[in-house]
Image (cartoon, grey):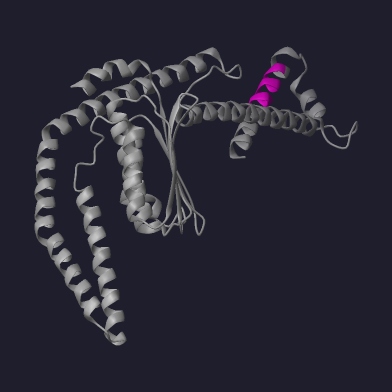
Amino acid sequence: MKAIIGRTILLTLMFSVIIAIFFYFFINVPLEEYRGLLFNTEAADMPLLAWLFTTIFIISLGLASWISLHSRMKENVIIGKLEDLYAKQQFTHSHKMKKKMNRSIEQLYEVLEAQRSSLRRITDERVETQDRIIQERIVQERQRLARELHDSVSQQLFAASMLLSALVEQSDEDSIHKPLLQVEKMVQQAQLEMRALLLHLRPAALHNKTLAQGLEELLQELQEKVTFDITHRLEDIELSKGAEDHLFRIAQETLSNTLRHAQATEVEVLLIERAGLAILRVQDNGVGFKQDDGKGGSYGLQNVQERAIEIGGSCKIVSVPSQGTIVEVKLPILKGELADDSSIISG
């Protein structure tokens, strides 16, 4: 509205000046007659000057409104194209924009694509370098921790379980038998948790598995130690090593958040390819959270968003209290980069 008012005032002043100059230079009438003509009210209820000013103002208001509407339409077209660059990660020419504007947005798209490709290459190289440097140390440290836990805590839990079993068999009094059974179940549950911990004390990496295979194994292991139902649909998608690594860790981070916070009874994991995009979606029916309560920016979900951006993808998080949460990552599949990445994978 402010823009329309400003344009109306400016156009009114411009038209008034133009008409005044026209009358002064091209209409050969003495100045006294001008005054009588402009201020004469005999022919109408208002002087001619008022009629002229009103007409100029209405025309200026109409032009200003049309210019503002036209500018807003162009702006909406440009905003739509920019949103497509982020959401769909593609650009198509629009007949509603000039060739120069189409070319400018196309150049922006090309720059963004180049940056995405560069980020993916950097990510792949960094992942491979980090794997080479720290993988051996991580494996050794986790194996050491697994051995120490197995030789100490695991053995003690096993001994306690055997002792409790013997006490349960020897006990005849109900007042002692029932508590002993409860303690035995607790110790057995602790043994299961310890086995699960020992199982996961290994590097969280794919180890020459495809992303679908790694997720399949992760979900099978997870199903053995949780009480809620996990359903999944995993398609084999050809991605670079860095992209697979990041998507695998995004899935781990999201499932970890679900375990800690969601209180869910059902979790669904999808890895599918649609319209040239690799889509990873983790959905639960847990407690959810309000988008503006700060949890959406928690460290775990923030880490997921950052990982998605690093590989040139986009991340969408939708959560409704008492209904659940959806975390969805979309990544363009660039077939041309797979050949370049094969040497890294084989190495």
Query: Is residue 56 rendered to the left or right of residue 174?
Result: right
| Image quarter (top left, top right, bottom left or bottom right) of the C terminus | top left
Does residue 309 appear in this view?
Answer: no
Q: Nearer the viewer, residue 125 or 32?
A: 125
x then y, percent, for residue 328: 44, 40
Q: What residue is rendered at 30% in x and 75% in y?
A: 182
Expressed as whole percent of the image width and height from the top left, the position of residue 203 reads: 19, 41
Task: Locate residue 211: give its quadrant.
Answer: top left
Magenta region: 14-22
Relative image position of residue 264 (x, y in whole percent): 44, 57
Q: Is residue 214 above or below residue 239?
A: below
Q: Is residue 344 above or below residue 61?
A: above
Indicate yes or no whether the magenta region holds residue 328: no
Q: Main secondary structure of the magenta part?
A: helix
Q: How far from the left and from the top, in percent, is residue 37?
A: 82, 26
Q: Is residue 176 visible?
A: yes
Instruction: Decide which of 209, 164 is in the foreground and name it.
Output: 164
Residue 210: which quarter of the image?
Answer: top left
| Image-based side of 305 in relation to 167, left or right | right
Instruction: Tell me the quadrant of the picture where the N terminus can be found.
Output: top right
Q: Nearer the viewer, residue 268 or 99?
A: 268
Q: Residue at x 42, y 21 (%)?
A: 109
Res 181 → quadrant? bottom left
